[in-house]
Amino acid sequence: MAATLSPIQIYSAEGFTARLVGWHGFPYADHVLYFKHCKAVHGFGLRQPLAVQFVDQHQQALGGWLCLKPQRVLFHAKAFGVLEMDWQQKAKRHLAWVAFQQAWQQQQIKSWRWQHFGQIRSGK
């Protein structure tokens, strides 16, 4: 019996604090965090590497998935946005890309906001 994979959700980091905190505070490790209007990401304070995919203004991939190691920076001059997910989930990277394309076309990217005072909101 084959194991079924849970559907991958795409969350967009909304607001200054969510974009600043990024993966450090993202509570959904099995899903993908999307940063629109973003050309660079950093790994300062990370404990594990992240898989990063830069996308252009038409939501097409700019190269393949890259490994963002702790204490490093990745930059792409032509990027419009970037996807981040756990590097250890190698088998899910293609599924994550397909999920992103579908969510973008169907406008089903969920918003994720980091609220001050320890409150986290998502999906609004």
Image (spheres, rainbow, N blue to C red):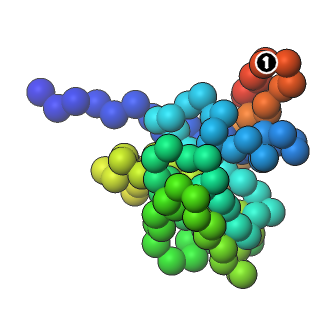
Q: In the displayed structure, would residue 4 be above or below residue 81?
A: above
* x then y, percent, for residue 16: 87, 45
Quarter-of-image position of residue 122: top right
Q: Residue at x 40, y 57 (%)?
A: 94
Q: Residue at x 78, y 46 (%)?
A: 20
* x then y, percent, for residue 105: 65, 54
Residue at mark 1: 119
Residue 58 visible at all: no
* x then y, percent, for residue 63: 51, 77
On-image quarter of the C terminus: top right
Residue at the bottom extreme of this rendering: 77
Quarter-of-image position of residue 38: bottom right
* x then y, percent, for residue 92: 37, 48
Q: Nearer the viewer, residue 54 or 43?
A: 43
Specify the amino acid type for callout 1.
Gln
Q: Residue at x 84, y 40 (%)?
A: 17
Residue 102 appears left or right of 14: left
Q: How many labels, in total?
A: 1
Q: In the displayed structure, would residue 1 be above or below residue 96?
A: above
